[in-house]
Image (tube, helix red, strand yellow):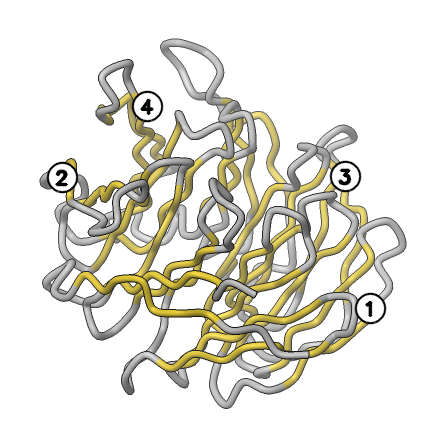
Amino acid sequence: MSKQYLTLHTLDGAHPSDIFALAPTKTQILSASGSSSIRIHDTTQTDFPLVQTLEGAHKLGIHHLATSKEGKTAASAGFEGVVKIWTLGEDALWSGKGDIVDQHNPGDIWAIAVSADGNYLASSSINGKVNVWSLAEKDTMPKIREYETKGSFGLCVDLSADGKFTASGHENGSVYIFNNDTGRLSHSLPGLVHPIRAVAFSPASKLLAAAGDSRIIALYDVTSGEQVANLTGHGGWVLSLDWSDTGEYLLSSSHDSKAKIWRIETKQCVATHSQGDRPLWAARWLPRATRSEMFALAGGNQAISFYREAAG
């Protein structure tokens, strides 16, 4: 059974270059691109107005953004090799908390993920190492876990909602799940061979989705490490993955300029949306504030488009 989604609004020219990352909170969406600034739009208003710009956040541009589920912590990763931590003030404006610098070489920190409570950040790196940092201290942000892999570029990373697991995807097709409690590798997952560009834990932390250049989305059981499903249909590299709040649906975007929504129960694609002919670097659900599901897409056309579930 298919689902219908309507285009709510499109912010044309949201950035002057490819938009590489979107990160929502309950009332806002943060976006970042090859330019140096982070832009923040209000998602509670129908025209999604720009409410803040973090000018010059990363002078060489920004490739990853992440927000905590509680909505008061954000992190940005720039091409210069620095991760910046941002906090939301009582005035609903974001300000810098500090920087995480790992040897200060571009690529030393690549992909990032922030825990649901905002207390931890996971990062991947060009040398394959996966690190977890504590953001809870007021003045310092120490590295508290360092996971070794086989040395292949870590293209993506995620933290489970319950905080127990870190997952990483690598250029050689490897996918790893680490146990944050024990500091040990839980599973080295088989199956995809080609570079992995997105990994995402389900909200209940029971499944991990992984995808990339193979154009297949693999679903793994987090406890057993068993591959339980393949979702096929994209015609290009899969660039991003995001689970709906309930875990019923998975949103994916691809280099083929298409976004797809998958119903997990049936393992079927229930909706496809195209956005021009440029790569869709980012697709994110917006936290559910009404009865209707909403998501946002962004990529090579420098626009952010918002979609809402059609009323049944």
Q: Position of residue 172 (x, y in %)?
A: 59, 72
The residue type indicated by label 1 comes to Gln
Q: Which of the two discs, 1 and 3, sits closer to the camera?
A: 1
* Residue, far front: 312
Of labels 1 and 2, earlier in sequence is: 2
Q: Which of the two discs, 2 and 3, sits closer to the camera?
A: 2
- Which residue has dot 3 on it? 184
What distance separates the C-alpha of mark 4 from that of mark 1?
A: 37 Å
Q: Which mark is residue 227?
A: 1
The residue type indicated by label 4 comes to Thr
Q: Is residue 144 above or below residue 206?
A: above
What distance separates the C-alpha of mark 2 from that of mark 3?
A: 40 Å
Considering the image in quadrants, where does the C terminus appear?
bottom right
Q: Residue at x 74, y 77 (%)?
A: 230
Look at the numbered disc 3 and give the secondary structure of its residue.
strand
Of labels 4 and 3, earlier in sequence is: 4
Of labels 4 and 1, earlier in sequence is: 4
Q: Residue at x 62, y 78 (%)?
A: 2
